[in-house]
Amino acid sequence: MTAVLILFMFVAFVGIDFLVRTSLRRMRENRERQAREAVLNTAIRLDFTHEAKSLKRVAVPNPKARILAVDDESVVLDSFRRILVLEGFSVDTVEHGPEALGLVQRNDYDFVFTDLKMPDMDGVEVVKAVKHLRPDVDVVVITGYGSIETAVQTLQHGACEYVQKPFTADELGDFAKKLLIKREARLEAARRPNVRMVSPEMAEVVPATEFCVPGGAFLSPGHAWVRIEPEGQVRIGIDDFVRKALGTVKEIELPERGKTVKAGETLFTLKGATGTVHVAAPLSGRIEHDNAGLKSDPGELIRSPYDRGWVCLLTPSDLATELSALKIGKPVIDWYQEEITRLRTANGPQGAGPLDWTAFEQQFLGADVHAKA
């Protein structure tokens, strides 16, 4: 009996919670709709002729996107404004193609909707011009049933989609939401850094806008690469992530030959114009050899990180166990993209300001601070 009562109370709680959440969501949506209605009714009476003769603008707070619509039929534009504003979009409308192009040059829009058949400038011309002026803007063609073939052809000129008229409020609202989802997915994909796997010598010719990882080598969480040599020793250096983050290395403190290090301890130190970073040993073992040429020319670390810029040769003491903590192949690329995104976030918008080497070391290199003394 007690178990049944507990089950009943649980079901009742879940049901009440669902009803409360649903009610609150509907209340919030109703408030937002009422606020948009008020903005719509007010904005439609405002004068924007100083920007464009036929311009009508409705800007809602926190819009989902900014849309510009151009059509020579005012009734179509009235529908666009009302439907899309109530859906949470800010909407500008004009009746002539040249007006639309002027606005595109002066404002930031996410979408431009253009009618296909207009007297002074047709939709094909608008599509071409908008994509020339603002390639980042998504252009949508408005077409009637008899112009589908031409609308499809506009896709070759850069239009991303077309919508048929007449349309219902639900049809246009759903269409706009799907467009927004596609745009956000595309922008997110474009923001993801391009990372590719290369042979050691090819790192020298990879564009500065791309990142590369060494094929056939392992990478440590502290961004040191490890390549297993035929004799069983391992060659170690810095990866492209460190190379691009630091930019310039003025001096390197090489590891001492014959010294034994543990994974995670400082292996070598890089000095630059704005600070010093310690690179952690990716594996435990004995230092057998170092790249002495880096003392006189540390720039090789930057020019050729996976080839001539190697740092040291180490005989591992527990390779079988410690190798599992390193990455190789496709997982490296996925991890790199996450690390690059994290670095961009840490370094501010557009990489504002010089890189804080101390913070970079703490967040990305993982050297054991107790081993630096």
Image: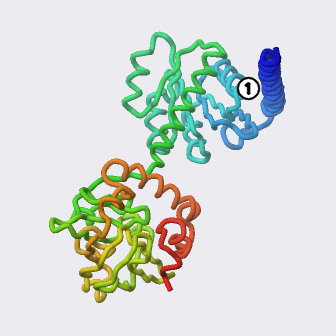
Please give the residue where the numbered disc 1 appears in the rendered image: 86
Q: Nearer the viewer, residue 162 or 69?
A: 162
Residue 234 found in image quarter: bottom left
Q: Is residue 237 above or below residue 145?
A: below
Q: Is residue 74 above or below residue 280?
A: above
Q: Nearer the viewer, residue 281 or 202?
A: 281
Q: Is 154 left or right of 350, judged from the image as shown?
A: left
Considering every residue shown, the one lying at the far left of the view is 230
Considering every residue shown, the one lying at the far front of the view is 1
Q: How is the image coloured?
A: rainbow
* Whether residue 351 can be seen here: yes
Percent coordinates x, y for residue 126 in the rendering: 49, 33
The residue located at (69%, 37%) in the rendering is: 63
Question: What crowding class fits label 1: few (fewer than 14 Cα within 10 Å), some (14-19), or many (20 or more)?
Answer: many
The residue located at (41%, 80%) in the rendering is: 270
Percent coordinates x, y for residue 109 in the rendering: 59, 41
Find numbered disc 1 in the image and state the secondary structure of the residue it sits on. helix
The residue located at (83%, 24%) in the rendering is: 20
Q: Amino acid at mark 1?
A: Leu
* Whether residue 19 can be seen here: no
Percent coordinates x, y for residue 157 in the rendering: 39, 32
Q: Is residue 25 above or below residue 50?
A: above
Q: Nearer the viewer, residue 127 or 49?
A: 127
Residue 298 found in image quarter: bottom left
Task: Tell me how many marks there are.
Answer: 1
Give the position of the N terminus as an image quadrant. top right
The residue located at (52%, 72%) in the rendering is: 355
Q: Nearer the viewer, residue 180 or 47?
A: 180
